[in-house]
Image: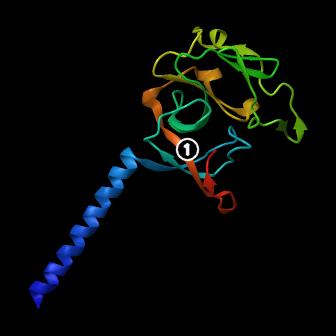
């Protein structure tokens, strides 16, 4: 009877260890939970939203990504505006990527209950980064709350190795649970 109990305990220990290893591998290589801090992505995301970040999808323009901040010891959530090879410019509150205008319905238009004009001050990639296009293995990112976002306009490009992954799913608050667009 004692040997049977020992075998049962060892079986449980092995199962728990195996499950723990699977969780660690998944978190390291496939996905991770992230908590949004601050208001730079308002109205798309708000402070304390909880997200699942996938580490396996290829990144595209306008994806929401989480990355290790180049200027602080924390993680940021921002929107990719420029991918390698893109030229980026904002003129008269219109985003131009490679000379093509883009509508940005996700950009916050209010501050303290007042309409903000312009939502994004004019700039060119050349003025901000001394580059006319986004270099290979780099991204140009902006927050959706342009008046209150520390983004590539302040710290320049982010490198591919700083990217944690793409924000794919919001699981808190419960009334906003769902796949990220």
Task: Please say if 15 is above or below 151.
Answer: below
User: Where is the N terminus found, in terms of image quarters?
Assistant: bottom left
x, y (%) of residue 97? 66, 19
x, y (%) of residue 154? 63, 22
User: Where is the C terminus found, in terms of image quarters?
Assistant: top right
**Mark 1 residue element:** strand
Give the camera-side residue of 3 and 37. Answer: 3
- Please count the marks in the image: 1
Residue at 63% over, 28% down? 151
Residue at 63% over, 52% down? 49
Give the camera-side residue of 33 and 80. Answer: 80
Mark 1 packing: few (<14 Cα in 10 Å), some, or many (20+)? many
Task: Please say if 92 is above or below 22.
Answer: above
Q: Please indicate whether residue 144 sits to the left or right of residue 8 in the image.
A: right
Q: Please indicate whether residue 180 sits to the left or right of residue 109 in the image.
A: left
Q: Which image quadrant is residue 110 in? A: top right
Residue most toward the front?
100
x, y (%) of residue 117? 87, 27
Task: Please say if 146 is above or below 154.
Answer: below
Residue most toward the bottom?
1
In this figure, which residue is indicated by the disc labeled 1?
167
x, y (%) of residue 140? 58, 23
Q: Which image quadrant is residue 115 in? A: top right
How did the renderer colour the structure?
rainbow
Residue at 55% over, 31% down? 60
């Amino acid at each position: 009877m004692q040997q049977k109990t020992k075998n049962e305990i060892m079986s449980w220990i092995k199962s728990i260890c195996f499950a723990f290893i699977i969780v660690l591998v998944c978190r390291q290589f496939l996905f991770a939970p992230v908590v949004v801090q601050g208001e730079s992505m308002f109205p798309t995301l708000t402070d304390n939203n909880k997200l699942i970040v996938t580490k396996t999808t290829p990144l595209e323009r306008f994806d929401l990504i989480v990355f290790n901040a180049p200027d602080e010891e924390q993680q940021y959530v921002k929107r990719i505006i420029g991918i390698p090879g893109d030229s980026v410019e904002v003129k008269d509150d219109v985003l131009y990527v490679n000379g093509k205008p883009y509508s940005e319905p996700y950009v916050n238009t209010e501050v303290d209950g007042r309409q903000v004009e312009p939502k994004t001050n004019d700039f060119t990639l050349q003025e901000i980064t001394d580059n006319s296009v986004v270099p290979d293995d780099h991204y140009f990112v902006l927050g959706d709350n342009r008046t209150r976002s520390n983004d590539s306009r302040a710290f320049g490009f982010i490198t591919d190795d700083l990217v944690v992954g793409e924000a794919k799913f919001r699981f808190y608050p419960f009334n906003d649970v769902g796949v990220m667009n």
